[in-house]
Image: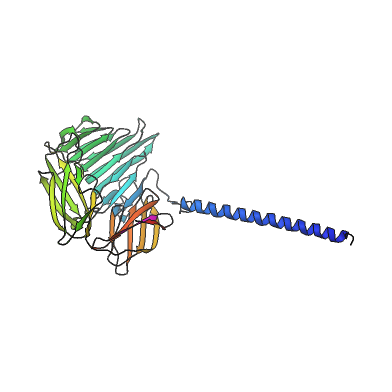
């Protein structure tokens, strides 16, 4: 049969259509895959997180992270409010942390103020003028840790403690304590230095130095003492309870070159050492060990302070923890319905569901599952993941690594 020109033309047209269709489908697939990968990458990197469009007043300090009960009393209205992710701090405001509260405040000179639990701080000044900055903070009670960055010559960052004014130098890491009952204060310099003025007399306190303020003068100035170093039980250790409760022997050593005359030991069921959860509160101990018996299954925390012969008291060391586990007990612990809400900064609220009464712990914070198994825990984490440990009163435990962006369980342990 001879070739039909019409049929040939139709075949060519049909083939051209089919080729264009194939190319178009391939392009759609490639674009779809690229879009899915882009969405996944953006989600993991919090590109879709809500942007905080907060209209901060000029020169206001920002609360970059917080946890627990933190309150601010406004100077203008005398209204006391609970801190949220949108809270700012203006000149004249008072910041108060309760027993479980702490907050990190960034000042206009980029310095950071870490307000510890049970503290009262007044932001007296936060202004920028003629290219310089003025920060002035008064510590009424409790403790703050302050870190400064590079500062221009016309910048001033001053902390008032007891009867002293302390101007922080650039690149300084310091802590200040104030006791509202005695009217005294303490100054500790880890790095950098401060220029301390009392009754018109100026003194420079340098790196690794301690000074006490009492009665309008410096009553002590000496080498900074480091906290005692825990030895046993090891951090994260498990103690077996074969009946009658677990027995633990605590031991510790002085930091190198910093002998203490006495020691202060606390053992608690709470990672924040809440007053109603402290089991051991022993001060003025002369030995470097302590034995505690009859501990029921669960997780415990312990920390130490040291006091030198001059009367200088160290900060608490970073708390260690251990667990008492009942021998011969088993049983798996599970959890579901995980969800994570980003409150602001590095603060997150983790919720989920497990067996009623379970102890839920993460980032040093602890709560209990309710009668329906639901739990809610506010934590502060600088990374994209957090470990959540769920345990019962028999010492059984299960750990979960949670992705803070998606709320998914990455792995169990």
Residue, far right: 2
Residue 78 seen from this side: no
The quarter of the displayed image where residue 153 is located: top left
Q: Quadrant of the N terminus?
A: bottom right
- x then y, percent, for residue 32: 59, 55
All told, the count of numbered labels is 0
Magenta run includes residue 399: yes
Query: Is 321 on the left-hand or right-hand side of 52?
Result: left
Q: Nearer the viewer, residue 328 or 49?
A: 328
Query: Is 106 on the left-hand or right-hand side of 26?
Result: left
Residue, far front: 1
* Residue 2 versus residue 159 in the image, above or below: below
Q: Main secondary structure of the magenta part?
A: strand
What span is colored magenta in the figure? Answer: 398-404
- x then y, percent, for residue 25: 66, 57
The quarter of the displayed image where residue 80 is located: bottom left
Q: Nearer the viewer, residue 148 or 320?
A: 320
Q: Quadrant of the C terminus?
A: bottom left
* Residue 92 versus residue 330 in the image, above or below: above
* Residue 382 versus residue 226 in the image, above or below: below
Residue 337 seen from this side: yes
The quarter of the displayed image where residue 84 is located: bottom left
Q: Nearer the viewer, residue 8 or 91?
A: 8
- x then y, percent, for residue 45: 46, 50
């Amino acid at each position: 049969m001879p070739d039909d020109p019409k049929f040939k033309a139709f075949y060519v047209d049909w083939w051209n259509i089919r080729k264009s269709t194939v190319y178009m489908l391939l392009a759609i697939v490639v674009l779809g895959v690229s879009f899915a990968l882009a969405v996944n990458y953006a989600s993991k990197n919090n590109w879709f997180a809500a942007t905080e469009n907060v209209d901060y007043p000029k020169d206001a300090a920002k609360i970059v992270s917080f946890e627990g009960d933190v309150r601010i009393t406004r100077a203008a209205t005398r209204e006391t409010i609970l801190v949220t992710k949108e809270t700012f701090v203006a000149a004249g405001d008072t910041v108060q942390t309760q027993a479980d509260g702490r907050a990190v405040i960034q000042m206009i000179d980029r310095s950071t103020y870490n307000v510890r639990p049970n503290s009262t701080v007044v932001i007296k000044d936060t202004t920028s003028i003629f290219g310089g900055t003025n920060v002035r903070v008064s510590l009424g009670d409790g403790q703050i840790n302050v870190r400064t960055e590079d500062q221009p010559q016309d910048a001033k960052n001053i902390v008032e403690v007891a009867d002293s004014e302390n101007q922080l130098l650039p690149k300084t890491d310091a802590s200040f304590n104030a006791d509202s009952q005695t009217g005294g204060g303490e100054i500790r310099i880890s790095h950098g230095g401060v220029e301390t003025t009392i009754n018109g007399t100026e003194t420079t306190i340098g790196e690794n130095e301690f000074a006490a303020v009492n009665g309008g003068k410096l009553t002590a100035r000496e080498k900074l003492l480091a906290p005692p170093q825990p030895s046993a039980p090891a951090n994260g250790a498990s103690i077996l309870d074969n009946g009658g409760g677990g027995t633990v022997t605590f031991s510790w050593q002085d930091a190198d070159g910093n002998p203490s005359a006495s020691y202060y030991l606390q053992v608690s069921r709470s990672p924040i050492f809440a007053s109603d959860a402290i089991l051991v509160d022993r001060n003025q101990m002369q030995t470097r060990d302590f034995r505690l018996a009859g501990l029921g299954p669960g997780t415990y925390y312990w920390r130490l302070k040291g006091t030198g012969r001059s009367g200088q008291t160290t900060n608490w060391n970073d708390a260690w923890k251990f667990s008492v586990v009942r021998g011969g007990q088993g049983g798996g612990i599970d959890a579901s319905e995980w969800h994570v809400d980003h409150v602001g900064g590095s603060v997150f609220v983790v919720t989920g569901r497990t067996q009623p009464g379970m102890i839920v712990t993460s980032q040093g914070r602890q709560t209990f599952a309710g009668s329906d198994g639901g739990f809610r825990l506010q934590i502060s984490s600088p990374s994209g993941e957090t470990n959540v440990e769920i345990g019962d009163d028999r010492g059984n435990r299960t750990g979960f690594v949670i992705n803070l962006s998606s709320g998914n369980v990455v792995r169990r342990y």
